[in-house]
Image (cartoon, rainbow, N blue to C red):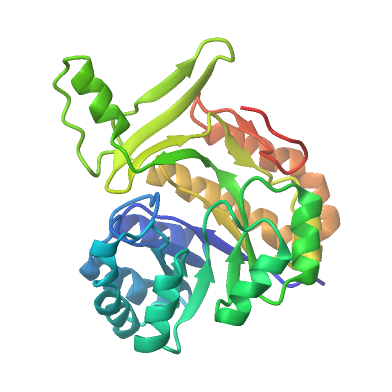
Amino acid sequence: MSNKPELLATPKDVAAAERLLHAGADALIIGEQRYGLRLAGEFTRADVEAVTELAHDAGKKVYVAMNALLHNDTVGELADYITFLKEAKVDAIVFGDPAVLMTAREVAPEMKLHWNTETTATNWFTANYWGRKGAKRAVLARELNMDSIIEIKENAEVEIEVQVHGMTCMFQSKRTLIGNYMTFQGKNLAVERTDQSRNMVLFDAERDAKYPIFEDENGTHIMSPNDISIIDELEEMIDAGVDSFKIDGILKSTEYMEKVVAIYRKAIDLCVDDRDAYDDKKDEFVEQVEAVQPDNRKLDTGFFFKETVY
């Protein structure tokens, strides 16, 4: 029997965190925009404490994202924030910048660190480099195919996390592109720093594709037109021992996330405990996920089996 991979999800607030834990998530990623990239919601320090307590009471884990592109003005704040996270007893910090790793070594040497630069985790050699520096986990880039993921896991000295569901980021710029465009157009559109709910999209008529776009403290983000979903293709990664399957909840409702987490919970458990039953239920799982999917967001298998062209 294979080890059961962790089911990791991103809630948008404290109430959502409780619901996703109840739906079957083993761990949650939370944080605040100032330090973390493309979070499903903004979590104050009080929120981080509340979610950590909820998760630990349920025997689950909480990871806090500190993988933003850090500039000089933020570096001086890292020690204070990491010290707070240590005192709040969060289970790990997700980092991309060595400044976070170096600061954590100083002020919270026991803290687990998950390396996540979003795009550059594309080979096992680099994953192991960060492992030797102190990272316990590498979060793989979303642009890898299944064979590459399996090969990395076979050679990795660290845990491996893979996104299995949700949208992915295609582009990020520190510039406030939407605000600049609206100003150029003479339109008075205040772009609020935390507003992902305005449903702005870039529309490509030729491909009939809508790319969600939003601005926050970290700049402008353009997201994929489709959502990844590989609920019927979990066997190879489970057999290879991939440690964590992530469902990304950015720009998704709590109701949606609750249903999707519950479906993946069943699929993962069946795939590990009763492979034949999982094979029999694959089509049903796909139908269940498709049933909760928003009309304007198609599902595909991302880069897992092909070179996706957007």
Where does the N terminus fall, quadrant-wise?
bottom right
Outermost residue on the front side: it is 72
Give me the residue at 43% from left, 62% from top.
29
Where does the C terminus fall, quadrant-wise?
top right
Q: Judge left or right: residue 86 versus residue 273.
A: left
Q: Is residue 235 visible?
A: no
* Residue 226 coordinates in the image, percent (x, y): 57, 31
- The answer to which image quadrant residue 120 occupies is bottom right
Outermost residue on the right side: it is 276
- The answer to which image quadrant residue 255 occupies is top left
Q: Nearer the viewer, residue 295 or 113?
A: 113
Residue 123, compared with residue 300, is above or below; it is: below
Q: Judge left or right: residue 229 versus residue 24.
A: right
Q: Nearer the viewer, residue 147 or 262?
A: 147
Give me the residue at 53% from left, 42% from top.
168
Give me the residue at 81% from left, 64% from top.
239
* Residue 164 coordinates in the image, percent (x, y): 62, 50
